[in-house]
Image: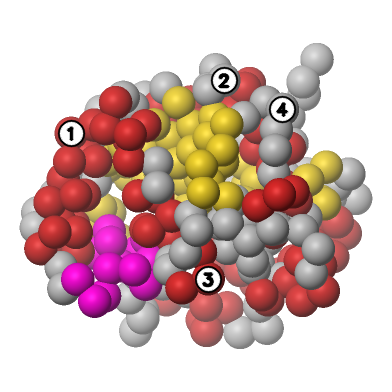
Amino acid sequence: MKGIILAAGRGSRMGCMTDARPKCLTVLAGRSLLDWQLSALKCAGVRDVTVIRGYRKECLRGPGYHTADNERWAETNMVATLQCAHDLLAAGPVVVSYGDIVYHPEHLRALAAARAPIAITYDTLWRSLWGERFEDPSEDVETFEAAAGRLQEIGGRPTDMDAVQGQYMGLLRFTPSGWGQVLDCLAALPAEGRPKLDMTSLLRALLTRDVEIETVGVDGGWCEVDCAQDVAIYTGRLRQPGWAHDWRWSES
């Protein structure tokens, strides 16, 4: 299993925190998001990691990881960044992570154990995290429905909050056959829309083609950093023992 971290975007909602560095270098609990991820991947046995760079790419030079570049990062979205790692995705199983999240190594182990060619994790305890991050959590919630461990719906606007089973985390796994299904799906989409395609829209498109996407539920133990307020919220919550979304683990 190899790893890919999608870290090409600037993260404009971070404000001045990303003026001089890419979003993945935001410091949380004393370490950058990238450092937390590399440590979690290593702990889970994923030691060959490639970071896809874009904004302020000169800041990302290892050691501990390889790099590839999305030169069109300012005019493309997450799926285009993922395609910059085509050779890796076509060669063997790969775990893929957004560059602005942190997570427990156990989530990676659970994802690696998935059997389907495409698999994603989702947080079953999302309500508590969204409740802390947003004044009105319903404004940032997307539909998520799974049945028998297979994704049924994702990325829409929910009309019934009680029907939302979890929230997608930005952590995925592809086998080469799964990546082939992605390429087939992309080829069938209008060419003008592909550069701006986001990951949940891709997953929705795959569902319309009846592609199996395995779902791996986790109970907290991760966070997404979308703005400076998130950093402040998480820093405060880590001072309180027993927080369900504490992603840290003992490295001893």
Q: Quadrant of residue 224?
A: bottom right
Residue at x 57% of width, y 20% of height:
47
- In this picture, residue 222 sits left or right of residue 144: right
Instruction: Report whether 209 appears left or right of 129.
Output: left
Q: Earlier in the sequence, mark 2 or mark 1?
A: 2
Which residue type does callout 3 highlight? Ala
User: Marks 3 and 4, Cα distance to the nearest angstrom?
Assistant: 25 Å
The mark nearer the N terminus, 4 or 1, is 4
Foreground mark, 4 or 1, reads: 4
- How has the structure been colored for display? secondary structure
Q: Which residues are magenta?
A: 191-204
Pointer 3 local density, CA inside 10 Å: few below 14, some 14–19, many at least 20: few
Q: CA distance from mark 2 to mark 1?
A: 22 Å
Q: CA distance from mark 2 to mark 4?
A: 12 Å
Q: Nearer the viewer, mark 2 or mark 4?
A: 4
Taking 90 as reference, is 143 above or below it?
below
Work out whether residue 155 or residue 158 is closer to the camera in this orientation and state it: 155
Q: Position of residue 96 (x, y in %)?
A: 45, 41
Q: Position of residue 69 (x, y in %)?
A: 51, 49
Badge 1, how many Cα within 10 Å: few under 14, some, many 20+? some
Q: Residue 177 got which mark? A: 1
Disc on res. 47? 2
Q: Tag 1's secondary structure?
A: helix
Residue in the image at 63% along x and 21% along y: 43
CA separation, marks 2 and 3?
29 Å
User: Three-letter amino acid code at disc 4?
Assistant: Pro
